[in-house]
Amino acid sequence: MNLLTTYRKRRWIRREADIARTEPDTMARHAQTEEVEPGSLQTVTLRDHIGGPWWALGLFGPIVSVDIGTHCPRCGQPRGLPQWRGRVQTWTNPCGHIDRPAALIDEASELLLGARVDAQIQRIHNRNNLIAARSAAQTRANRAARAKGYTHA
Ligand SMILES: [Zn+2]
């Protein structure tokens, strides 16, 4: 993937995640993740380095709290324990992979988009169940009406 594609993809993921944060269904599903997969997520506080790395004004950016996985996305081993360093949290992974804030915020955004997909699937299930229940009720009603009709005939 070239640089522009990567940039566009990340910008799209961020924008969609910002929209997803305003969707009650998505956020409800995201909050349930802890029940579905206990200990899979952790909330960390980071600086969103707007403008790139520290040497390019990256020091200035909002502090954000995001939900990320408890395991390294590259090797699956547990992440290091977050420690407060000023207003943000940092940690050292035992596996040696380095977590950069931009990648962590992308990871949190992707998790939210996953929750959005799950919420959408749940909505489809609910609607199908409703249709099936209505259809079953209609079948019962038809059968009852037919039975009544036969007794009268
Ligand atoms: Zn790792």
Image (cartoon, rainbow, N blue to C red):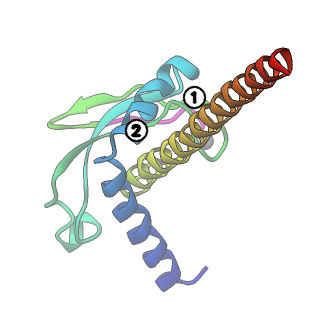
Q: Residue at x 49, y 44 (%)?
A: 111
Quadrant assignment for ligand 1: top right
Instruction: State the SS at label 1.
Output: loop
Mark 1 residue type: Pro
Q: Tell me how far mark 2 sits from mark 1, CA to CA.
A: 29 Å
Taking 28 as reference, is 36 left or right? right
Residue 49 against residue 69 in the figure, above or below: below
The question of residue 94 being in magenta is answered with yes
Q: Is label 1's Cβ within 8 Å of ligand 1?
A: no
Tell me: residue 127, above or below residue 51.
above
Q: Residue 30: tell me if it is visible.
A: yes
Q: Residue at position x 41%, y 25% from top?
A: 81
Residue 122 is situated, as x and y percent measured from the top left of the image, at: 57, 36
In the rendering, at what x and y percent does residue 97 appear? 55, 46
Splitting the image into 4 quarters, where does residue 148 fall?
top right
Majority secondary structure of magenta residues: loop
The furthest residue to the top: 151
Label 2 lies in ligand 1 vicinity (Cβ under 8 Å): no
Where residue 153 appears, as percent x and y from the top left, is 86, 22
Name the residue at 65% across, 27% down. 133
The answer to whether residue 108 is magenta is no
Q: Is residue 38 visible?
A: no
Label 2 with label 1: CB-CB less than 8 Å? no
Q: x%, y% of residue 143?
A: 79, 23
- Residue under label 1: 78
Q: Earlier in the sequence, mark 2 or mark 1?
A: 2
Q: Which residue is mark 2?
A: 25
Question: Magenta span covers which residues?
Answer: 90-98
